[in-house]
Amino acid sequence: MTNFESLFNEFGSLRVAVIGDVMLDTYWWGNVERISPEAPVPIVALHHREQRIGGAGNVALNTVSLGAETSLFSVTGDDADATILSNLLLQHHIDTKYLVRSKSRITTNKIRVMSRNQQMLRIDSEIIHEISPQDEGLLFDNFSAYVKNNPPHVVIFEDYNKGVEYFPAMLAAITNAQKSITFENFIWRSGEVSDRFIDAADFAGPDNNIFLQGYRTSDLNLDGFIDAADFSFPDNNIFIGSNVPE
């Protein structure tokens, strides 16, 4: 029988690297009392704003909450939203020194307009194309330095289709690093299903829709995937999962 107290206590000795798309989740809360005379839309009388850590940052927040020493690797804009997000991360003791600020991007910010606990509107401020080769190089250099100085026990990829993870060179280099440095876990949560990662998986659990889409449009070996979907935690486990794009 699993000793859950001992299991959770062990998180305090882990170093975790989270790589992926970070974002700011913003909530504008207000009351609706009337319809605009300018157009048939409700008028929201704003009374407060709330900002939260989103995307890969939320995964980092979860690992920190479990007690793990967590470093975050991502690319943000060089803007006010990046400063707000960085400050939120630091408040929760998440290591931000490996974040790359890019002048060619903006920080993803999803603004939700709320009234009476109902979401009325969402405004997405983001750039979703792949990060530039320059930003990719900086991100990889940061990860390489981190691995050299503080080899992680766990590496988590967290992909929301916002540009950070779709560059083969980064994935190949980190996969190669795994061969030379013993990662106790290699966790892959992605919007794409890939034979390359499934073949290495000990534990698999993708989002159904994304998995089926990948299976129908690729040469994915379904039998191999099912074999990989071993719902247990072996000594050197790799987890494949996925997220619906935000």
Image (cartoon, rainbow, N blue to C red):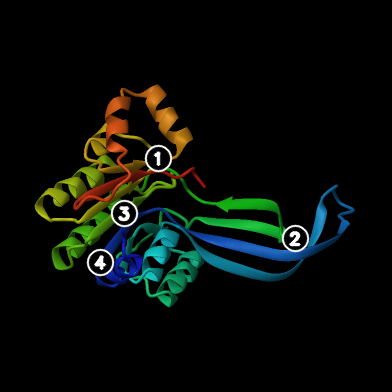
> Crowding near pointer 2: few (<14 within 10 Å), some, many (20+)?
some
Q: Which residue is mark 4?
A: 15
User: Is residue 199 positioned above or below 142 on the image?
Assistant: above
Q: Which residue is mark 2?
A: 115
Residue 53, horizontal then vertical, whole percent:
49, 64
- Disc 2 residue type (three-letter): Ser
Q: Earlier in the sequence, mark 1 or mark 3?
A: 3
> Crowding near pointer 4: few (<14 within 10 Å), some, many (20+)?
some
Compute the Cα span from label 3 to label 4: 11 Å
> Crowding near pointer 1: few (<14 within 10 Å), some, many (20+)?
many
- Disc 1 residue type (three-letter): Pro
Residue 233, horizontal then vertical, whole percent:
27, 51
Q: Which residue is mark 1?
A: 206
The answer to whether mark 2 and mark 1 are in CB contact below 8 A is: no
Q: Nearer the viewer, residue 223 or 16?
A: 223
> Crowding near pointer 3: few (<14 within 10 Å), some, many (20+)?
many
Compute the Cα span from label 2 to label 1: 34 Å
Q: Helix, strand, or loop for circle 4? A: strand
Comparing marks 2 and 1, which lies closer to the viewer? 1
Q: Helix, strand, or loop for circle 2? A: strand
- Disc 4 residue type (three-letter): Arg
Q: Earlier in the sequence, mark 4 or mark 2?
A: 4
Residue 59, horizontal then vertical, whole percent:
41, 59
The answer to whether mark 1 and mark 3 are in CB contact below 8 A is: no
**Going 28% across and 61% down the picture, which residue do you hit?**
17
- Disc 3 residue type (three-letter): Ile
Q: Earlier in the sequence, mark 2 or mark 1?
A: 2
**Going 53% across and 66% down the picture, which residue do you hit?**
52
Q: Which residue is mark 3?
A: 156
Compute the Cα span from label 4 to label 1: 24 Å
